[in-house]
Image: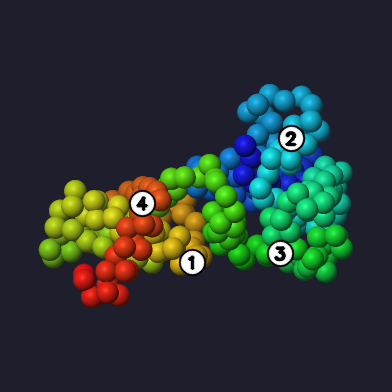
């Protein structure tokens, strides 16, 4: 079952477009970090070994619960396959088989909404400056519209470990949150709990959040740290229930 369909023009004059790099980043985020099932032409078809593109595309569009259309030029949205994909999806929306909140465009290279085909201007649109927030918007929609393959949710972020007078500080630069521990093992465990608590709040209150930075980039940015580690936090439905119970206890004065 496909959760998200990413539509974009992959090449221009024999070279990869800016859309391609952006689409690959979204694909990696949705699949490896958020564990959604995502269809993307150059990645998904290569993995499946499909030769009948149209048949595979039609099947994915039929299953998809959300469509993201990327473009860095107006012509990208009018290219043969991209136009076919969003036009087909809009027919499903107009036929009442999909929600009109289940499609968005992502505009690169300073494109404006007015630069989009008229058929797409009515729907939600983001510019490239909102790229880091887009997965959270999509996740919010999918998590409130039925069963998703992204349960439990898993989040992996780089954390910077530095020494202090009492042990170790741990800082998540992408989220601007921190914790500490008396020794490395304790600091690591607290880091996991800190990250988990952060995303429990994100899910409960529908908050936007930044995507994780590249691990090597964080290492280069903090050369004086003791270590940079990837911290994994996994959420399930019981986490939100526990959070609700804690809130109720506080409100009733029993905590």
Q: Are marks 2 and 1 in contact (CB under 8 Å)?
A: no
Q: Secondary structure at mark 2?
A: helix
- Dot placed on the residue nearer the N-terminal end, 2 or 1: 2
Which residue corresponds to the image point at 78% horizontal and 53% vertical from the top-left? 96
Where the C terminus falls, by quadrant?
Answer: bottom left
Residue where numbered disc 3 is placed: 124
Residue 179, compared with residue 70, is above or below; it is below
Residue where numbered disc 4 is placed: 238
Q: Is residue 212 visible?
A: yes
Numbered-mark total: 4
- Left or right position of 120 against 66: right
Compute the Cα span from label 3 to label 4: 32 Å
Q: Residue 178's x, y, as percent?
A: 30, 64
Query: In which image quadrant can residue 109 be found?
Result: bottom right
Q: Are marks 4 and 1 in contact (CB under 8 Å)?
A: no
Residue where numbered disc 2 is placed: 59
Q: Residue 5's x, y, as percent?
A: 68, 45
Which residue corresponds to the image point at 82% horizontal and 51% vertical from the top-left? 95
Compute the Cα span from label 2 to label 1: 32 Å
Q: Residue 164's x, y, as percent?
A: 18, 64
Query: In which image quadrant can residue 116 be found?
Result: bottom right
Residue where numbered disc 1 is placed: 207
């Amino acid at each position: 079952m496909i959760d998200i369909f990413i539509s974009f023009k992959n090449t221009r004059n024999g070279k990869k477009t800016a859309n391609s790099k952006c689409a690959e980043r979204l694909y990696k985020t949705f699949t490896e970090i958020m564990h959604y099932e995502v269809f993307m032409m150059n990645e998904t078809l290569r993995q499946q070994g499909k030769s009948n593109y149209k048949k595979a595309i039609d099947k994915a569009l039929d299953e998809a619960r959300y469509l993201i259309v990327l473009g860095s030029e107006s012509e990208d949205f009018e290219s043969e396959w991209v136009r076919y994909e969003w036009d087909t999806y809009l027919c499903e929306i107009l036929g009442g088989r999909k929600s009109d909140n289940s499609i968005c465009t992502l505009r690169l290279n300073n494109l404006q909404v007015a630069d989009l085909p008229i058929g797409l201007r009515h729907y939600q649109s983001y510019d490239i400056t909102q790229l880091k927030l887009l997965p959270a918007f999509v996740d919010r929609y999918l998590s409130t519209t039925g069963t998703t393959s992204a349960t439990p949710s898993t989040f992996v972020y780089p954390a910077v470990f530095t020494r202090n007078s009492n042990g170790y500080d741990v800082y998540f630069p992408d989220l601007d949150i921190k914790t500490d521990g008396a020794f490395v093992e304790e600091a690591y465990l607290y880091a996991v709990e800190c990250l988990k608590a952060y995303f429990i709040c994100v899910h409960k209150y529908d908050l936007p959040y930044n995507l994780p930075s590249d691990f090597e980039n964080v290492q280069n940015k903090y050369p004086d740290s003791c270590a940079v580690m990837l911290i994994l936090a996994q959420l399930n439905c019981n986490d939100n229930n526990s959070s609700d119970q804690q809130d109720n206890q506080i409100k009733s004065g029993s905590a």
